[in-house]
Amino acid sequence: MGHLGYAVSAYRAQGVTVDTSHVLVDPSMTRENLYVALTRGKDVNLAYVATDAPDVAHAHPHEVEDMEEAARRVLHGVLHHSGAELSVHETIQAEQERWGSILQLAAEYETIATEAQHDRWATLIRTSGLTDTQAEAALSSEAFGALAAELRRAEANHHDVDQLMPRLVAARDFDDADNIASVLHWRVANATIQPASAGRTRWAPRLIAGLIPVAVGITDPDMKEALAERHQLIENRAAALAEQAIADGAAWAQALGARPDESRKQDAWNRHARTVAAYRDRYRIASAAALGAEPDGVAQKIDHARAAQAIQRARALTAEHAWPQAGGRASGRERGRTL
Protein backbone atom coordinates (compact mmCIF):
# COMPACT_ATOMS: atom_id res chain seq x y z
CA MET A 1 0.00 0.00 0.00
CA GLY A 2 1.30 3.43 -0.91
CA HIS A 3 1.71 6.35 1.44
CA LEU A 4 -0.32 9.56 1.21
CA GLY A 5 1.63 12.77 1.60
CA TYR A 6 0.41 16.34 1.93
CA ALA A 7 2.37 19.30 0.49
CA VAL A 8 5.71 17.55 0.55
CA SER A 9 8.46 19.65 -1.02
CA ALA A 10 10.84 18.26 -3.62
CA TYR A 11 13.65 18.52 -1.07
CA ARG A 12 11.77 16.36 1.45
CA ALA A 13 10.67 13.96 -1.27
CA GLN A 14 14.25 13.13 -2.25
CA GLY A 15 14.85 9.48 -1.45
CA VAL A 16 11.13 8.79 -1.00
CA THR A 17 9.36 6.37 -3.37
CA VAL A 18 5.58 6.24 -3.86
CA ASP A 19 3.22 4.49 -6.27
CA THR A 20 1.89 7.71 -7.80
CA SER A 21 3.52 11.13 -7.65
CA HIS A 22 1.57 14.36 -8.18
CA VAL A 23 3.80 17.39 -8.76
CA LEU A 24 2.79 21.07 -8.77
CA VAL A 25 5.11 22.97 -11.14
CA ASP A 26 5.33 26.76 -10.97
CA PRO A 27 7.75 29.23 -12.63
CA SER A 28 9.95 29.43 -9.50
CA MET A 29 10.85 25.73 -9.55
CA THR A 30 14.37 24.67 -10.57
CA ARG A 31 15.09 21.91 -13.05
CA GLU A 32 16.88 19.91 -10.32
CA ASN A 33 13.76 19.95 -8.12
CA LEU A 34 11.57 19.04 -11.07
CA TYR A 35 13.76 16.00 -11.78
CA VAL A 36 13.52 14.83 -8.18
CA ALA A 37 9.77 15.38 -8.02
CA LEU A 38 9.07 13.53 -11.28
CA THR A 39 11.10 10.45 -10.36
CA ARG A 40 9.38 9.56 -7.08
CA GLY A 41 6.48 7.56 -8.50
CA LYS A 42 7.02 3.90 -9.32
CA ASP A 43 3.90 3.62 -11.47
CA VAL A 44 2.84 7.15 -12.41
CA ASN A 45 4.35 10.63 -12.25
CA LEU A 46 1.93 13.49 -12.97
CA ALA A 47 2.81 17.17 -13.28
CA TYR A 48 0.29 20.00 -12.81
CA VAL A 49 1.61 23.28 -14.24
CA ALA A 50 0.57 26.59 -12.66
CA THR A 51 -0.08 29.05 -15.49
CA ASP A 52 -1.69 31.93 -13.59
CA ALA A 53 1.45 33.95 -12.84
CA PRO A 54 0.85 37.63 -13.77
CA ASP A 55 2.55 38.91 -16.93
CA VAL A 56 3.44 42.40 -15.73
CA ALA A 57 5.25 43.31 -18.96
CA HIS A 58 2.25 42.30 -21.08
CA ALA A 59 4.66 40.46 -23.37
CA HIS A 60 2.12 37.74 -24.16
CA PRO A 61 -1.29 39.46 -24.33
CA HIS A 62 -3.24 36.51 -25.80
CA GLU A 63 -1.55 33.52 -24.26
CA VAL A 64 -3.60 33.39 -21.07
CA GLU A 65 -6.37 31.94 -23.24
CA ASP A 66 -4.10 29.13 -24.50
CA MET A 67 -3.38 26.96 -21.47
CA GLU A 68 -1.20 24.45 -23.32
CA GLU A 69 1.01 27.20 -24.66
CA ALA A 70 1.24 28.83 -21.23
CA ALA A 71 2.18 25.48 -19.67
CA ARG A 72 4.92 24.92 -22.25
CA ARG A 73 6.31 28.37 -21.47
CA VAL A 74 6.44 27.62 -17.73
CA LEU A 75 8.11 24.24 -18.29
CA HIS A 76 10.62 25.81 -20.67
CA GLY A 77 11.52 28.34 -17.98
CA VAL A 78 11.87 25.66 -15.29
CA LEU A 79 14.17 23.57 -17.50
CA HIS A 80 16.39 26.63 -17.93
CA HIS A 81 16.32 27.49 -14.21
CA SER A 82 19.24 25.77 -12.53
CA GLY A 83 19.50 25.56 -8.75
CA ALA A 84 23.00 24.09 -8.79
CA GLU A 85 25.52 25.77 -6.50
CA LEU A 86 27.73 28.33 -8.25
CA SER A 87 31.01 29.88 -7.21
CA VAL A 88 31.00 33.53 -6.10
CA HIS A 89 32.49 34.57 -9.45
CA GLU A 90 29.94 32.49 -11.38
CA THR A 91 27.09 33.91 -9.31
CA ILE A 92 28.18 37.51 -9.94
CA GLN A 93 28.65 36.79 -13.64
CA ALA A 94 25.24 35.08 -13.90
CA GLU A 95 23.50 37.96 -12.12
CA GLN A 96 25.18 40.55 -14.34
CA GLU A 97 24.18 38.55 -17.40
CA ARG A 98 20.57 38.19 -16.25
CA TRP A 99 20.02 41.82 -15.29
CA GLY A 100 21.87 43.12 -18.33
CA SER A 101 20.10 40.88 -20.83
CA ILE A 102 17.68 42.22 -23.42
CA LEU A 103 15.08 39.87 -21.94
CA GLN A 104 15.28 41.83 -18.69
CA LEU A 105 15.83 45.29 -20.18
CA ALA A 106 12.93 44.93 -22.63
CA ALA A 107 10.61 43.84 -19.81
CA GLU A 108 11.66 46.86 -17.76
CA TYR A 109 11.20 49.18 -20.75
CA GLU A 110 7.70 47.90 -21.50
CA THR A 111 6.66 48.03 -17.83
CA ILE A 112 7.83 51.64 -17.49
CA ALA A 113 6.21 52.57 -20.82
CA THR A 114 2.88 51.05 -19.75
CA GLU A 115 2.91 53.10 -16.55
CA ALA A 116 4.10 56.30 -18.27
CA GLN A 117 1.45 56.13 -20.99
CA HIS A 118 -1.46 54.93 -18.84
CA ASP A 119 -3.18 58.30 -18.44
CA ARG A 120 -2.77 59.08 -22.12
CA TRP A 121 -4.38 55.83 -23.24
CA ALA A 122 -7.10 56.23 -20.62
CA THR A 123 -7.96 59.65 -22.04
CA LEU A 124 -7.91 58.28 -25.59
CA ILE A 125 -10.32 55.48 -24.68
CA ARG A 126 -12.68 57.79 -22.78
CA THR A 127 -12.88 60.20 -25.75
CA SER A 128 -13.05 57.55 -28.49
CA GLY A 129 -16.84 57.33 -28.69
CA LEU A 130 -17.41 54.59 -26.12
CA THR A 131 -20.07 55.14 -23.49
CA ASP A 132 -18.81 55.92 -19.98
CA THR A 133 -19.69 52.39 -18.89
CA GLN A 134 -17.90 50.81 -21.83
CA ALA A 135 -14.80 52.98 -21.36
CA GLU A 136 -14.51 52.14 -17.67
CA ALA A 137 -14.99 48.43 -18.46
CA ALA A 138 -12.12 48.60 -20.96
CA LEU A 139 -9.84 50.43 -18.51
CA SER A 140 -10.50 47.96 -15.69
CA SER A 141 -10.09 44.90 -17.92
CA GLU A 142 -7.08 42.60 -17.61
CA ALA A 143 -6.69 43.09 -21.37
CA PHE A 144 -6.03 46.83 -21.00
CA GLY A 145 -2.27 46.25 -20.71
CA ALA A 146 -2.25 44.32 -23.97
CA LEU A 147 -4.30 47.08 -25.63
CA ALA A 148 -1.82 49.69 -24.38
CA ALA A 149 1.08 47.67 -25.79
CA GLU A 150 -0.74 47.42 -29.14
CA LEU A 151 -1.32 51.17 -29.22
CA ARG A 152 2.40 51.67 -28.56
CA ARG A 153 3.24 49.35 -31.47
CA ALA A 154 0.82 51.27 -33.69
CA GLU A 155 2.51 54.57 -32.87
CA ALA A 156 5.92 53.03 -33.49
CA ASN A 157 4.56 52.19 -36.96
CA HIS A 158 3.68 55.91 -37.39
CA HIS A 159 -0.11 55.49 -37.12
CA ASP A 160 -2.08 58.41 -35.69
CA VAL A 161 -3.91 56.57 -32.90
CA ASP A 162 -5.82 59.72 -31.88
CA GLN A 163 -7.63 59.61 -35.23
CA LEU A 164 -7.60 55.82 -35.58
CA MET A 165 -9.27 54.88 -32.29
CA PRO A 166 -12.57 56.79 -32.87
CA ARG A 167 -12.85 55.18 -36.32
CA LEU A 168 -12.33 51.70 -34.88
CA VAL A 169 -14.91 52.32 -32.15
CA ALA A 170 -17.46 53.59 -34.69
CA ALA A 171 -16.84 50.70 -37.10
CA ARG A 172 -19.08 48.31 -35.17
CA ASP A 173 -20.95 48.28 -31.87
CA PHE A 174 -19.90 46.32 -28.79
CA ASP A 175 -23.26 44.85 -27.85
CA ASP A 176 -22.02 41.26 -28.15
CA ALA A 177 -18.50 41.91 -26.80
CA ASP A 178 -17.52 40.03 -23.65
CA ASN A 179 -14.37 42.11 -23.25
CA ILE A 180 -14.25 45.53 -24.90
CA ALA A 181 -10.51 45.97 -24.33
CA SER A 182 -9.80 42.66 -26.11
CA VAL A 183 -12.00 43.65 -29.04
CA LEU A 184 -10.26 47.02 -29.32
CA HIS A 185 -6.89 45.29 -29.12
CA TRP A 186 -7.87 43.02 -32.03
CA ARG A 187 -9.16 45.96 -34.10
CA VAL A 188 -6.03 48.04 -33.53
CA ALA A 189 -3.74 45.10 -34.34
CA ASN A 190 -5.51 44.37 -37.61
CA ALA A 191 -5.66 48.02 -38.66
CA THR A 192 -1.95 48.66 -38.03
CA ILE A 193 -0.20 45.51 -39.26
CA GLN A 194 1.82 47.53 -41.78
CA PRO A 195 3.67 50.80 -41.04
CA ALA A 196 1.83 53.96 -42.02
CA SER A 197 2.89 55.61 -45.26
CA ALA A 198 2.78 59.05 -46.82
CA GLY A 199 2.13 58.78 -50.53
CA ARG A 200 4.64 56.36 -51.94
CA THR A 201 6.93 56.64 -48.92
CA ARG A 202 6.64 54.02 -46.19
CA TRP A 203 8.23 55.09 -42.95
CA ALA A 204 10.40 52.60 -41.10
CA PRO A 205 9.01 51.57 -37.70
CA ARG A 206 10.55 53.22 -34.64
CA LEU A 207 12.05 50.17 -32.97
CA ILE A 208 14.79 49.63 -30.41
CA ALA A 209 17.35 47.14 -31.76
CA GLY A 210 14.90 46.43 -34.57
CA LEU A 211 12.40 44.77 -32.21
CA ILE A 212 10.96 46.82 -29.36
CA PRO A 213 8.47 49.62 -30.14
CA VAL A 214 9.63 53.02 -28.93
CA ALA A 215 7.28 54.68 -26.45
CA VAL A 216 6.51 58.23 -27.60
CA GLY A 217 4.64 61.14 -26.09
CA ILE A 218 6.13 60.66 -22.61
CA THR A 219 6.01 63.92 -20.61
CA ASP A 220 7.14 62.82 -17.14
CA PRO A 221 10.90 63.64 -17.02
CA ASP A 222 11.81 60.72 -14.72
CA MET A 223 9.94 58.20 -16.85
CA LYS A 224 11.42 59.69 -20.00
CA GLU A 225 14.95 59.39 -18.60
CA ALA A 226 14.37 55.80 -17.41
CA LEU A 227 13.11 54.79 -20.86
CA ALA A 228 16.02 56.53 -22.60
CA GLU A 229 18.53 54.73 -20.37
CA ARG A 230 17.07 51.32 -21.16
CA HIS A 231 16.78 52.19 -24.84
CA GLN A 232 20.53 52.86 -24.94
CA LEU A 233 21.38 49.79 -22.84
CA ILE A 234 19.40 47.54 -25.21
CA GLU A 235 21.12 49.00 -28.26
CA ASN A 236 24.55 48.65 -26.62
CA ARG A 237 23.86 45.07 -25.58
CA ALA A 238 22.67 44.08 -29.07
CA ALA A 239 25.74 45.67 -30.66
CA ALA A 240 28.13 43.91 -28.25
CA LEU A 241 26.47 40.51 -28.78
CA ALA A 242 26.53 40.89 -32.55
CA GLU A 243 30.20 41.91 -32.64
CA GLN A 244 31.16 39.05 -30.33
CA ALA A 245 29.29 36.52 -32.45
CA ILE A 246 30.96 37.83 -35.62
CA ALA A 247 34.42 37.73 -33.98
CA ASP A 248 33.80 34.17 -32.76
CA GLY A 249 32.49 33.04 -36.13
CA ALA A 250 29.22 31.91 -34.54
CA ALA A 251 27.03 29.82 -36.83
CA TRP A 252 24.08 32.18 -36.53
CA ALA A 253 26.24 35.16 -37.53
CA GLN A 254 27.58 33.27 -40.55
CA ALA A 255 23.97 32.74 -41.65
CA LEU A 256 23.78 36.50 -42.35
CA GLY A 257 26.51 36.25 -44.97
CA ALA A 258 29.76 38.18 -45.12
CA ARG A 259 29.78 41.76 -43.85
CA PRO A 260 30.15 44.17 -46.82
CA ASP A 261 33.17 46.48 -47.03
CA GLU A 262 31.32 49.50 -48.35
CA SER A 263 30.50 51.87 -45.46
CA ARG A 264 26.79 52.44 -46.16
CA LYS A 265 26.03 48.76 -46.75
CA GLN A 266 28.16 47.78 -43.75
CA ASP A 267 26.12 50.05 -41.46
CA ALA A 268 22.88 48.51 -42.71
CA TRP A 269 24.29 44.97 -42.37
CA ASN A 270 25.43 45.70 -38.80
CA ARG A 271 21.96 46.99 -37.95
CA HIS A 272 20.37 43.76 -39.18
CA ALA A 273 22.90 41.68 -37.25
CA ARG A 274 22.03 43.59 -34.07
CA THR A 275 18.35 42.80 -34.58
CA VAL A 276 19.06 39.07 -34.79
CA ALA A 277 21.36 39.27 -31.76
CA ALA A 278 18.64 41.12 -29.83
CA TYR A 279 16.05 38.48 -30.75
CA ARG A 280 18.30 35.66 -29.58
CA ASP A 281 19.04 37.40 -26.28
CA ARG A 282 15.44 38.37 -25.63
CA TYR A 283 14.16 34.82 -26.10
CA ARG A 284 17.22 32.97 -24.80
CA ILE A 285 18.06 31.31 -28.10
CA ALA A 286 21.21 29.23 -27.63
CA SER A 287 21.06 26.97 -30.69
CA ALA A 288 23.25 27.32 -33.77
CA ALA A 289 20.14 28.10 -35.83
CA ALA A 290 19.88 31.88 -36.06
CA LEU A 291 16.29 32.09 -34.78
CA GLY A 292 15.98 28.79 -32.96
CA ALA A 293 12.71 26.87 -32.94
CA GLU A 294 9.42 28.23 -34.26
CA PRO A 295 7.90 30.57 -31.64
CA ASP A 296 4.69 29.87 -29.75
CA GLY A 297 3.82 33.24 -28.23
CA VAL A 298 2.06 36.07 -30.05
CA ALA A 299 4.68 38.70 -29.15
CA GLN A 300 7.56 36.40 -30.04
CA LYS A 301 6.00 35.63 -33.42
CA ILE A 302 6.03 39.35 -34.23
CA ASP A 303 9.68 39.64 -33.20
CA HIS A 304 10.53 36.42 -35.06
CA ALA A 305 9.16 37.92 -38.27
CA ARG A 306 11.24 41.09 -37.76
CA ALA A 307 14.40 39.06 -37.10
CA ALA A 308 13.75 36.82 -40.11
CA GLN A 309 13.37 39.92 -42.28
CA ALA A 310 16.67 41.25 -40.88
CA ILE A 311 18.41 38.04 -41.97
CA GLN A 312 16.97 38.30 -45.45
CA ARG A 313 18.08 41.92 -45.79
CA ALA A 314 21.57 41.16 -44.49
CA ARG A 315 21.92 38.35 -47.03
CA ALA A 316 20.72 40.66 -49.79
CA LEU A 317 23.44 43.17 -48.90
CA THR A 318 26.00 40.36 -48.95
CA ALA A 319 24.77 39.28 -52.38
CA GLU A 320 24.99 42.85 -53.69
CA HIS A 321 28.54 43.04 -52.36
CA ALA A 322 29.49 39.79 -54.11
CA TRP A 323 28.12 40.68 -57.58
CA PRO A 324 30.92 43.07 -58.66
CA GLN A 325 33.55 40.55 -57.53
CA ALA A 326 31.93 37.94 -59.74
CA GLY A 327 32.38 40.15 -62.79
CA GLY A 328 29.03 41.86 -63.01
CA ARG A 329 25.46 41.72 -61.76
CA ALA A 330 24.18 38.22 -61.18
CA SER A 331 21.32 36.79 -63.15
CA GLY A 332 17.90 36.33 -61.58
CA ARG A 333 18.54 32.61 -61.09
CA GLU A 334 21.93 33.25 -59.46
CA ARG A 335 20.45 35.91 -57.19
CA GLY A 336 17.79 33.46 -56.11
CA ARG A 337 20.44 30.92 -55.13
CA THR A 338 22.50 33.55 -53.29
CA LEU A 339 19.55 34.69 -51.19
Image (cartoon, helix red, strand yellow):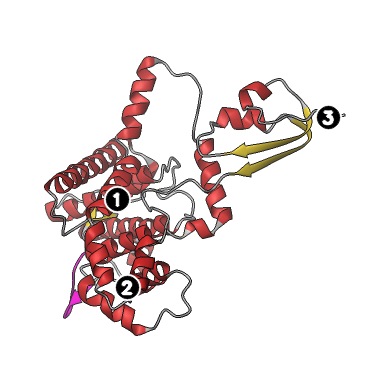
Q: Which label sits in the foreground, 2 or 1?
A: 2
First to last magenta residue range: 196-204
User: Can residue 330 be seen?
Assistant: yes
| Nearer to us in this view, 193 or 154 | 154
* Residue occupying the point 18% across, 47% down: 223
Rendered-image quadrant of the C terminus: bottom left
For the residues labelled 1 and 3, the Cα–Cα distance comes to 49 Å
SS at mark 2 in the image: helix
SS at mark 3 in the image: loop
SS at mark 1 in the image: helix
Rate crowding at label 2 as few (under 14), some (14 to 19) or many (20 or more) other CA atoms within 10 Å: few
Q: Which label sits in the foreground, 3 or 2?
A: 2
Q: Amino acid at mark 2?
A: Asp
> In the picture provided, is 116 more to the left or to the right than 70?
left
Identify the residue under disc 3. Answer: 2
Q: Which label sits in the foreground, 1 or 3?
A: 3
Identify the residue under disc 2. Answer: 132
The picture places residue 183, in percent across and down from the top left corner, at 41, 72
Q: Is residue 337 above or below residue 111?
A: below
* Residue occupying the point 28% across, 53% down: 114
Rate crowding at label 1 as few (under 14), some (14 to 19) or many (20 or more) other CA atoms within 10 Å: many
Identify the residue under disc 1. Answer: 110
Q: Is 201 one of the magenta-colored residues? A: yes
Q: Based on the displayed image, in which of its 4 quarters is residue 287 positioned?
A: top left
User: Can residue 160 be seen?
Assistant: no
Q: Is residue 68 above or below residue 32?
A: below
* Residue occupying the point 73% across, 22% down: 16
Q: Amino acid at mark 1?
A: Glu
* Residue occupying the point 24% across, 43% down: 234
